[in-house]
Image (cartoon, helix red, strand yellow):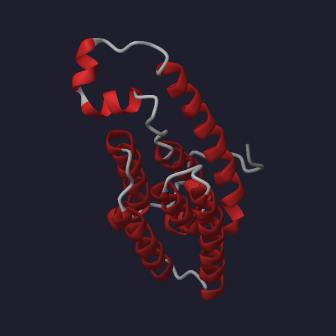
Amino acid sequence: MSGRSFDPAEKAPRMSPMDTLLLLFFPALMAFGAVSDLLTMTIPNRLSLLLVAGFFAMAVLTGMPVETIGMHLAAGLLVLFITFSMFAFGWIGGGDAKLAAATGLWCGFGVLLDYALFASVLGGALTLLILCWRRFLLPEFAFRVDWIARLHHAKTGIPYGIALAAAGLAVYPQTAIWMSVAGV
């Protein structure tokens, strides 16, 4: 808990409907990425491009200083370098690398370590859960559902985009954009 005491007479700053829409942009795209990865084992390139374009639009709309934008860009590029190295070794998919980098752009260095920690823990838990689930036989009807059959197959990878999206959502309220729009 923070050192501030709660005063019921003190009202929280009121957000406009536009502020609410702006705050929902990132979560909506992250949810789409997670669902897409679960159902198709792909994260569309347009999702990562929308996240990047959305960050820059939000940075301008919130009056983020150019130096801060530059630091966020550096954080995103660092994540891109690391994740594409992981992709080159075959450890993660290309969509995962791009999604992580776009999320790193939104996080900036201030939240990046928390994001990486959440993504690692959630990704490890997701991987263990799916690997254990794959040891059980599926009922016959489940094999007729493409995404369930694909996810259950031992040769299929892990939809790590789910963990990346969940980690991004977990740290989003700590980002500069969230704080600026929410008036925190």
Question: Residue 124: image x %, image y %?
Answer: 62, 36
Question: Residue 47: image x %, image y %?
Answer: 37, 62
Residue 159 visible, this angle:
yes
Residue ranking furthest to the bottom: 66
Q: Is residue 51 above or below residue 9?
A: below
Q: Is residue 149 left or right of residue 181?
A: left
Please state, as top left, top right, bottom left or bottom right, where the N terminus lies in the image: top right
Q: Is residue 145 left or right of residue 100?
A: left
Please name the residue shown 39% across and 54% down the image: 43
Question: Residue 46: image x %, image y %?
Answer: 34, 66
Residue placed most toward the observer, 131 or 73 = 131
Please name the residue shown 61% across and 46% down the image: 119
Residue ranking furthest to the right: 3
Please name the residue shown 47% across and 78% down the image: 56
Q: Is residue 146 left or right of residue 80?
A: left
Question: Residue 16: image x %, image y %?
Answer: 37, 65
Q: Is residue 58 left or right of residue 149?
A: right
Please state, as top left, top right, bottom left or bottom right, where the C terminus lies in the image: bottom right
Residue 6 visible, this angle:
no
Residue placed most toward the observer, 103 or 138 = 138
Count of picture labels? 0
Asked where in the image residue 19 lies, by quadrant, the reply is bottom left
Please name the residue shown 60% across and 52% down the image: 171
Q: Is residue 157 above or below residue 49?
A: above
Q: Is residue 53 above or below residue 51?
A: below
